[in-house]
Image (spheres, rainbow, N blue to C red):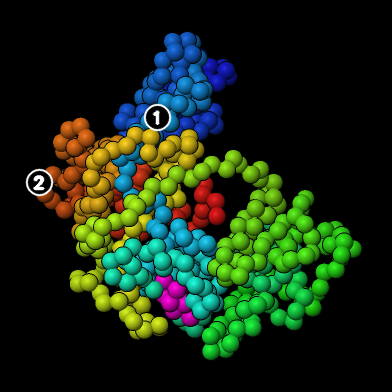
């Protein structure tokens, strides 16, 4: 056994234990990009460094074996500064969008590229999940949303923007007719939230909280839910659309109490004594504070939904006694403005049709799959679980700390289910080692030296041939989605927000 101290705590580990393993067994979070269980340490990213206070040296913890008497620091100033420097060097060469421009602009944070892939593949149940999980009222917003997501769409700079609003309207309408989407709720938590105001904000908050297992009751002063959206002309917005989506929320277990006007502190005191939390989703009722939370109704329908979702997320944390963490600025890698030739290359590599699709001029598309096939898929397949994004956010790394004059690499290698984007690759070597571990007959290899070094498939074989047996593990291990399934994303991106807040 070996005795040492980590962060001033004396521990004893078995001989041959790495510093990384020792620290993690203590519950200490250690950042890594090139480490993968089952593969020998690569020592290529140096993000996992720790400092030995006795010698003053920084050691890569994934490959450094614990030695008797070491005094290890995992998060001292020198360690954090070194990690930040490593991250800034890596991201100076990293190319790609963390978020597709359309999703980044959506106030409700819907994962639009995922919807596009699901529609194109004919997976309308999956698309219904995506649009409902993102927009709560996807059919209603298909009529009343001004579609801010369509303006930054890169396809717009090439020919004509993707008709995102019409697509999620079509998906929601199809789901309502064929298979009304009722997302399952977890077991009841025993906590009960009241929401004052049955506009899109209040109902969206209730939907999120029910999805967290909390009971919800909505008080509404009018005879029906929906607020100002009920006053639109029928030819502009068919009211049965809103009614159908309100009914879906009620069937999820949300209770509606109509003709309930809240007047003064007396009413609010009674409410506070009855419920575990209160969300005020209308004006002039009560100020936020304590267990009262404000969710601002908004004239922009999709922002109203987004406000409700965000407030519900904070209420869920409050009910679960989860302390809000520090608000780090999320790292955002962006392509920026692309030229016409760049967009043409992107179209050739991403469009799901043999020839350029002609944009549909009609308001309601004849074929949603054709339209979805036009998507350029300028999103990251690991937008949520990307290790580089997480650690760059946590350490406050700056994208432009080290400017590079290299031409941006937009290439996508691979014509089948697996794709490799050299511009996103940090040359950690994990995919090469994993392919070798699986005994691939062709595998992957490093080609070139220095800044020109990159991952390639030997002998000009296709990527699918190089990773026939190891594809799934290569994709799972890749810290940046440089190697990914073309039409799939990480599970977290589809079903949860993990470390990224709404």
Look at the magenta stretch and give its main secondary structure.
helix
**Figure quadrant of residue 63:** top left
Marks 1/2: CA–CA distance: 36 Å
Q: Does the magenta segment cover residue 40?
A: no
Residue range highlighted in magenta: 164-173
Q: Which residue is nearer to you in this view: 43 or 199?
A: 199
Residue at 45% x, 50% y is 384
Q: Position of residue 176 (x, y in %)?
A: 51, 80
Quadrant where the image shows the C terminus: bottom right
Q: Position of residue 315 (x, y in %)?
A: 68, 54
Q: Which residue is nearer to you in this view: 373 or 5?
A: 373
Mark 2 neighbour class, 10 Å CA radius: few under 14, some 14 to 19, many 20 or more? few
Mark 1 neighbour class, 10 Å CA radius: few under 14, some 14 to 19, many 20 or more? some
Number of marks drawn: 2
**Figure quadrant of residue 40:** top left
What residue is disc 2 on?
Answer: 459
Q: Which residue is nearer to you in this view: 234 or 245?
A: 234
Residue at 58% x, 19% y is 9
Residue 472 in sight from this viewpoint:
no
What residue is disc 1 on?
Answer: 85
Q: Position of residue 424 (x, y in %)?
A: 30, 46
Sequence-first disc among 1 and 2: 1
């Amino acid at each position: 056994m070996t005795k040492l101290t980590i962060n001033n705590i004396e521990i004893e580990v078995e001989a041959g234990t790495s510093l990384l393993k020792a620290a993690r067994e203590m519950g200490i979070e250690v950042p890594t990009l090139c480490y993968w269980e089952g593969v020998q340490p690569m020592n290529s990213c140096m993000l996992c460094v720790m400092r030995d206070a006795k010698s003053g040296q920084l050691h890569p913890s994934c490959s450094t074996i614990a030695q008797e008497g070491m005094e290890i620091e995992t998060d001292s100033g020198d360690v954090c500064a070194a990690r930040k420097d490593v991250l800034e060097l890596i991201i100076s060469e990293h190319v790609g969008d963390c978020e597709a421009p359309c999703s980044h602009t959506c106030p409700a944070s819907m994962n639009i590229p995922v919807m596009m892939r699901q529609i194109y593949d004919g997976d309308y149940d999956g698309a219904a999940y995506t649009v409902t999980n993102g927009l709560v009222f996807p059919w209603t917003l298909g009529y009343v949303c001004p579609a801010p997501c369509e303006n930054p769409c890169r396809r717009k700079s090439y020919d004509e923007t993707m008709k995102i609003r019409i697509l999620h309207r079509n998906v929601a309408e199809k789901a309502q007719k064929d298979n009304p989407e009722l997302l399952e709720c977890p077991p009841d938590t025993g906590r009960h939230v009241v929401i004052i105001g049955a506009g899109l904000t209040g109902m969206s908050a209730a939907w999120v909280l029910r999805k967290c297992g909390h009971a919800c009751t909505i008080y509404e002063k009018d005879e029906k839910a929906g607020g100002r959206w009920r006053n639109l002309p029928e030819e502009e917005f068919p009211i049965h659309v809103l009614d159908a989506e309100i009914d879906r929320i009620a069937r999820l277990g949300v209770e509606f109490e109509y003709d309930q006007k809240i007047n003064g502190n007396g009413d609010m005191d009674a409410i506070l004594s009855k419920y575990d939390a209160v969300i005020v989703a209308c004006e002039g009722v009560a100020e936020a504070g304590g267990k009262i939370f404000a969710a601002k109704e908004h004239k922009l329908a999709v922002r109203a939904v987004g406000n409700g979702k965000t407030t519900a997320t904070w209420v869920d944390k409050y009910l679960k006694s989860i302390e809000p963490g520090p608000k780090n600025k999320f790292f955002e890698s962006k392509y920026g403005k692309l030229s016409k030739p760049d967009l043409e290359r992107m179209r050739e590599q991403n469009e799901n049709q043999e020839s350029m699709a002609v944009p549909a001029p009609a308001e309601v598309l004849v074929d949603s799959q054709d339209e979805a096939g036009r998507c350029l898929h300028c999103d990251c397949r690991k937008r949520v679980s990307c290790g580089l994004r997480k650690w760059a956010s946590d350490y406050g790394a700056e994208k432009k700390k080290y400017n590079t004059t290299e031409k941006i690499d937009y290439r996508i290698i691979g014509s089948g289910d697996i794709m490799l984007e050299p511009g996103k690759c940090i040359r950690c070597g994990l995919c090469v080692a994993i392919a070798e571990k699986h005994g691939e007959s062709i595998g992957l290899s490093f080609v070139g030296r220095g800044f020109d070094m990159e991952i390639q498939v030997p002998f000009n074989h296709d990527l699918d041939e190089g990773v026939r047996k190891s594809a799934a593990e290569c994709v799972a291990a890749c810290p940046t989605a440089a190697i990914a399934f073309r039409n799939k994303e990480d599970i977290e991106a589809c079903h949860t927000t993990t470390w990224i807040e709404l």
